[in-house]
């Protein structure tokens, strides 16, 4: 049995369903990965979601959605004075752009209570987070989260990080780079996307991305690279893997999130890095051929 705790923000998703018509759902990078993990792992495995929501009807509907998806919700915190964030998706030629409303999002307070955080991590095997998880938090809460993850790792837990660099969510780019690097230093596995890393860290090639994160002490780095080869760095050994070719990309939403789930589910079950990468690439290829973050 593996128990995974995904940490982050689930939001209301409004996706276009035609002219001036939107379809409501729930999504968010770490929740997307948790949703897919739940479908890929065995019944004995447990996937929990750790966040904060409000006490309003929309928050209740979100928690019910998570429960119906098979995710553990026992440690979700409730805030009476807050609610949940919302975003809309706009698509053009398969590429997506987003507009966000998260000023009232309770998830921004998810690391306010260190005891609640450590309670959620008790008896967990894996903690999963992203750069977005860190970006939405006030600076003191980021420090609390990273300190808690360091304690979790020191006690034998495994920390998995998707840097998911979104500079618009941060105070400034230097803060983003510094905090993500700090998060990598307490992470065992890092799952970056080279396009983001090249833009904001200046990495010339996927190997540079892998080496930079390896310098922080991570044992396994998988560098996603769009339609290019995926680079795996494991304890100093480098291998390249071909992605799955997709001729008709409909929507790239959650491509990286689903890759992470496909990779991790296979990896946790004892498969090789090559097998796990192909699992991730195969799932991502399926997801980008349909609309929305969560594809049955």
Image: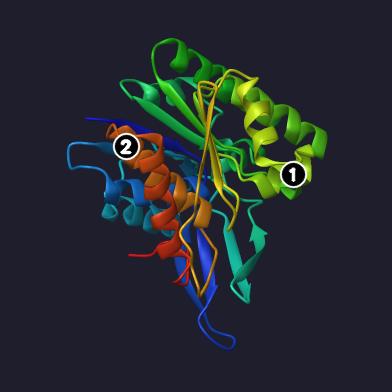
How many numbered discs, if any?
2
Q: Quadrant of the N terminus?
A: top left
Query: Pointer 2: what residue?
Result: 74
* Image quadrant containing the C terminus: bottom left
User: Which of the marked residues, 2 or 1, is nearer the chain's N terminus?
Assistant: 2
Q: Quadrant of residue 204?
A: top right
The answer, for residue 155, to whether it is visible in the render is yes
197 to the left or right of 189? right
Residue 144, given in percent of the width and then of the height, sits at: 59, 21
Alpha carbons under labels 2 and 1: distance apart: 38 Å
* Residue 57 image offset from top left, x and y in percent: 42, 59
Residue at left 59%, top 54%? 228
Q: Residue at x 57, y 60 (%)?
A: 86
Find numbered disc 2 in the image and state the secondary structure of the residue it sits on. loop
Rendered image: mark on residue 198:
1
Q: Quadrant of residue 286?
A: bottom left
Near-viewer residue (132 or 66): 132
Residue at the far top: name it.
Answer: 154
């Amino acid at each position: 049995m593996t128990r995974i705790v995904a940490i982050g923000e689930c939001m209301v998703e409004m996706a276009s369903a035609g002219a001036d018509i939107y379809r409501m759902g729930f999504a968010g990078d770490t929740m997307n990965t948790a949703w897919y993990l739940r479908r890929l792992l065995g019944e004995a495995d447990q996937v929990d979601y750790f966040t904060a929501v409000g006490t309003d009807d929309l928050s209740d509907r979100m928690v019910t959605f998570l429960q119906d998806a098979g995710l553990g919700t026992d440690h979700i915190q409730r805030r009476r004075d807050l609610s949940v964030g919302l975003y809309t998706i706009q698509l053009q030629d398969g590429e997506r752009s987003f507009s966000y409303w998260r000023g009232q999002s309770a998830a921004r307070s998810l690391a306010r209570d260190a005891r609640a955080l450590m309670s959620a991590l008790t008896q967990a095997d894996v903690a999963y987070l992203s750069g977005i998880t860190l970006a939405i938090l006030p600076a003191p809460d980021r420090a609390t989260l990273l300190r808690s993850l360091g304690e979790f790792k020191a006690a034998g837990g495994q920390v998995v990080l998707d840097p998911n660099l979104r500079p618009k969510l941060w105070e400034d780019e230097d803060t983003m780079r510094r905090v993500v690097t700090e998060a990598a230093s307490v992470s065992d596995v890092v799952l970056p996307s080279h396009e983001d890393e090249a833009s904001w860290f200046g990495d010339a090639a996927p190997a540079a991305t892998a080496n930079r994160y390896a310098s922080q002490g991570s044992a396994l780095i998988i560098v996603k690279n769009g339609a290019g080869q995926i680079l795996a760095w494991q304890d100093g050994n480098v291998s390249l893997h071909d992605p799955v070719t997709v001729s008709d990309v409909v929507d790239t939403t959650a491509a990286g999130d689903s890759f992470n789930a496909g990779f991790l589910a296979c990896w946790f079950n004892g498969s090789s890095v090559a097998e796990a990468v192909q699992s991730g690439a195969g799932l991502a290829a399926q997801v980008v051929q349909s609309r929305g973050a969560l594809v049955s």
